[in-house]
Image (cartoon, grey):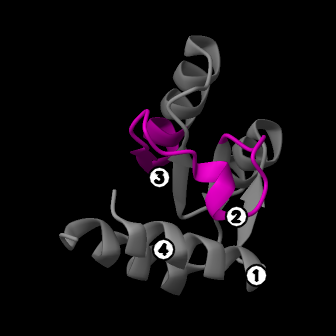
Amino acid sequence: MNKGFLNFLGLANRAGALVTGTELVLAGVRSQRVRMVVIDASVSDGTLKKVTDKCKFYNVQVVCAPKSINVGSAIGSENRKVIGVVDKNFATQLNKKLEMKD
């Protein structure tokens, strides 16, 4: 996960293209609004399993951040650990940022 990805995630947040929090993200996955889920490495094992299983069932991409990165800080909220991208174009661009090297 590179800095460009995190910066773009912050941009997506300012554009209103994200939902945050486990329950809101899971509801978005169920309603097929969420296109991509980003999970912080510090989430509990139960939360990780719940989110990844739901995403696998609904065929939603999951990106797990390494331990050295706090994804909540990218969106300006340190305590957010599960983030869902609802905009298709932002999800596509975030995928491209993941493939790029720093």
Cα separation, mark 1 vs mark 3, equals: 22 Å
Mark 1 Cα-neighbour bin, 10 Å: few <14, some 14–19, many ≥20: few
- Find the distance from the CA under tag 1 to the CA under tag 4: 15 Å
The image position of residue 26, as x and y in percent, is 71, 42
Q: Is residue 78 magenta?
A: yes
- Tell me which amino acid carries mark 3: Val
Q: Which residue is label 2 attached to?
A: 75
Q: Is residue 57 visible?
A: yes
Q: Is residue 64 above or below residue 97?
A: above
62 to the left or right of 76: left
Q: Which residue is mark 1?
A: 14
Q: Nearer the viewer, residue 9 or 32?
A: 9
Q: Are marks 2 and 4 in contact (CB under 8 Å)?
A: no
Q: Position of residue 40 (x, y in %)?
A: 55, 38
Dot 1 or dot 4, earlier in sequence: 1
Point out which mark residue 60 bears.
Answer: 3
> Element type at marker 3?
loop
Observer able to see residue 32: no
Task: Return the x and y of residue 33 as percentages of the image width and height.
Answer: 67, 65
Which segment did they paint magenta?
Answer: 55-81
Note whether 22 is above or below 88 in the view shown: above
35 sits to left or right of 98: right
Mark 3 or mark 4, which has the lower sequence index? Answer: 3
Q: Is 78 placed above or below 56 here?
A: below
Q: Name which residue type carries label 2.
A: Ile
Q: Tell me whether the residue at label 1 lies in contact with that at label 4, contact meaning CB atoms closer than 8 angstroms.
A: no
